[in-house]
Image (spheres, rainbow, N blue to C red):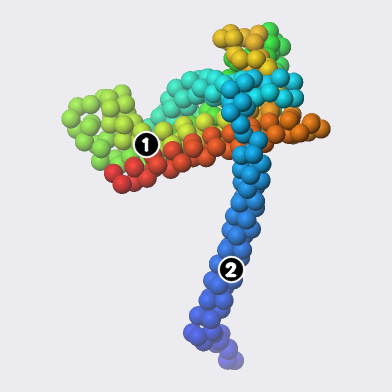
Amino acid sequence: MSTLAPTRRPAHQIRLSRRIASVSGWTLTGACLFALSALMVWILEVVFVRGVTALKLSVLTTVTQGTGGGLLNAIEGTLVLSAGALLLAVPFGVAAGIYTAEYRFTRWATTIRFLADVLVGVPSIVVGYFGYVGMVEWLGWSFSVAAGSIALAIISLPYICRTTELALRQVSNDLRDAAYSLGANDRRVILGVCLPAALPAVLTGVLLALAVSVGETAPLLYTAGWSNYLWDGHLTHSPIGYLTYAIWNFINEPFAAANALAYAAALLVTGFVLIINIAARLVLDRRARR
């Protein structure tokens, strides 16, 4: 009883099918990239064209007055809230990233890594609701800078943690071995050798976390509230303005002045995020050249 040997496709047919699959894949990828790029350009065009026409010197130098006025209070509030979030998130995020990178196989490192990944996927409005229940109501802080900064810090924390971990894991083990051979302990190796070598990438993660916090709205609605006035310096019982609220609220108003403030605020937020991302890219490029 004879068995038929399996027929093999000719080599030129195999090459042709692979080429067709490759061309189809690249064509689909290019089409998706073109669609996303066109959509991004359209969004930026709307923001920049309408924002530039609405952005005047008075918008930058006066506070909001009802549905008109300027955005000085919102600009100051965005800077204050973002700075407060970084002051809280950077020490804890970098420390957590160092631990998960240098002691990656321990149970605590696995737990921290898992919690950071989960926290990245938590909707920001849930963080805002937690801040409202925990800080605004339970602690009695009312709408305040402290509640808003802590909410933004919670959102920024996992990004800083994970980028710090990845940056430290890219440091060559030869540096660690050389430091240990010279008699350095774990503390000196981590803080004196590994962290300086990974500092540009760590700084990039901090800048990206800052960009995320600048563009948040939902958590601040529940924690920072809104104020038409400049910040009075109090951390609690003192609401504060911020740019994303101006976008969210004023774009729905039936007044041209309010809509203009919304477009101006959108331009400022986009400019802040763009500057932050360019700075992060420059830091990475400088590290690559080194």
Task: Name the residue rendered at 40%, 42% in the picture.
Answer: 282
Task: Name the residue rendered at 59%, 55% in the picture.
Answer: 37
Tell me the crowding category of disc 2: few under 14, some 14 to 19, or many 20 or more residues within 10 angstroms, Cα based: few
User: Is 240 located above or below residue 160 in the figure?
Assistant: above
Which residue is label 2 attached to? 27
Residue 208 percent location from the top left of the image: 50, 36
- How many marks the image carries: the answer is 2
Task: Name the residue rendered at 70%, 34% in the picture.
Answer: 260
Question: In which image quadrant can residue 286 be found?
Answer: top left
- Can residue 147 be seen? no
User: Is 165 located above or below residue 67 in the figure?
Assistant: below
Residue 278 percent location from the top left of the image: 46, 41
- Can residue 132 be seen? yes
Amino acid beneath label 1? Pro
Quadrant where the C terminus sits is: top left
User: 274 or 35: nearer the eye?
Assistant: 274
Task: Name the residue rendered at 28%, 31% in the picture.
Answer: 193
Direction from residue 202 to residue 4 in the image, left or right: right
Direction from residue 271 to residue 163 in the image, left or right: left
Q: Which mark is residue 200?
A: 1
